């Protein structure tokens, strides 16, 4: 009898210890989930600020002795960008840029890097409709689908193609540029923000249900899993 009571008490103590350990683990994971995004955010901000601060200041110090004041490099960089933009908008600045483009165009390697960077900047900051549509494409093989963003449209041998950028997870700044026939692109109800969250989280943060959509005479219609338009009952359930 005594042995049974001791075993019973021992089991109760073990259960209590397990529940305490689980509670401590849950508290620790909660703290981790709160602190890691904050730490990464501050790390990225400080890294960018440090990069901007040291972008021009070290070269100016070769000419003018400047004291080591925190944030001075950022102020100088912002002022330089502002005055360069001001100069580029007037007549003489535009002429100077035309001459610079003519000179760069004659240097093979420099020309490729310069124009690729220039086109990327123009795409990011002047064309607001870029990457505004999220699609699925069969990549890297058949029956396997990847999230993609439509970047452009192009004709190849009289056939219409979408230029689709397929980002890699968890770093969306690297990826693949694909030429996909328009009829082979699958439109979805995913927004760019939702798709970005899926990529950054490696699929951990995702909608429970993704709908296919079809553009028909200017109207976007939701499709069910069979590729048919949703019935009234299916719409209410979704």
Image (tube, rainbow, N blue to C red):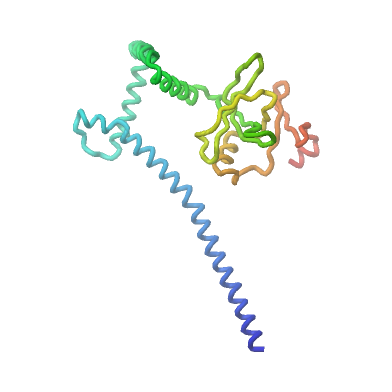
Residue situated furthest left in the rendering: 65
Query: Can residue 90 be seen from the camera position used here?
Result: no
At which x and y percent is residue 225? Answer: 75, 37
Count of all numbered marks drawn on residues in the image: 0
At which x and y percent is residue 88? Answer: 36, 17
At which x and y percent is residue 74? Answer: 32, 34
At which x and y percent is residue 49? Answer: 36, 38
Given residues 179 and 32, the one toward you in this image is 179
When the figure is inspected, residue 29 is found, relative to residue 101, above or below; the finding is: below
Residue situated furthest bottom in the rendering: 1
* Residue at screen point 40% across, 17% down: 108
When the figure is inspected, residue 59 is found, relative to residue 89, above or below; the finding is: below
Asked which quadrant contains residue 58, the reply is top left
* Residue at screen point 32% across, 32% down: 55
Query: Can residue 95 be seen from the camera position used here?
Result: yes
* Residue at screen point 35% across, 13% down: 103
Q: Name the image quarter holding the C terminus.
A: top right
Asked which quadrant contains residue 215, the reply is top right
Q: Name the image quarter holding the N terminus.
A: bottom right
* Residue at screen point 54% across, 67% down: 21
Given residues 163 and 144, the one toward you in this image is 144
């Amino acid at each position: 009898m005594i042995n049974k009571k001791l075993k019973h008490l021992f089991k109760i103590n073990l259960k209590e210890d397990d529940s305490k350990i689980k509670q401590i683990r849950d508290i620790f994971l909660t703290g981790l989930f709160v602190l890691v995004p904050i730490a990464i955010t501050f790390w990225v901000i400080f890294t960018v600020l440090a990069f901007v601060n040291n972008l021009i200041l070290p070269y100016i110090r070769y000419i003018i002795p400047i004291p080591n004041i925190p944030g001075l490099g950022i102020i100088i960089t912002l002022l330089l960008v502002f005055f360069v933009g001001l100069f580029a908008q007037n007549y003489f600045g535009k002429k100077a840029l035309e001459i610079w483009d003519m000179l760069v165009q004659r240097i093979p390697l420099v020309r490729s890097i310069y124009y690729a960077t220039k086109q990327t900047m123009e795409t990011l900051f002047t064309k607001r409709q870029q990457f505004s549509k999220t699609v699925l494409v069969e990549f890297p093989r058949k029956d396997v689908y990847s999230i993609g963003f439509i970047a452009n449209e192009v004709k190849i041998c009289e056939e219409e193609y979408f230029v689709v950028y397929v980002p890699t997870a968890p770093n969306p700044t690297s990826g693949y540029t694909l030429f996909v026939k328009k009829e082979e692109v699958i439109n979805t109800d995913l927004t760019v923000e939702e798709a970005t969250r899926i990529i950054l989280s490696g699929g951990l943060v995702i909608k429970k249900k993704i709908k296919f959509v079809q553009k028909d005479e200017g109207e976007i219609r939701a499709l069910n899993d069979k590729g048919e338009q949703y019935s009234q009952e299916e719409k209410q359930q979704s």
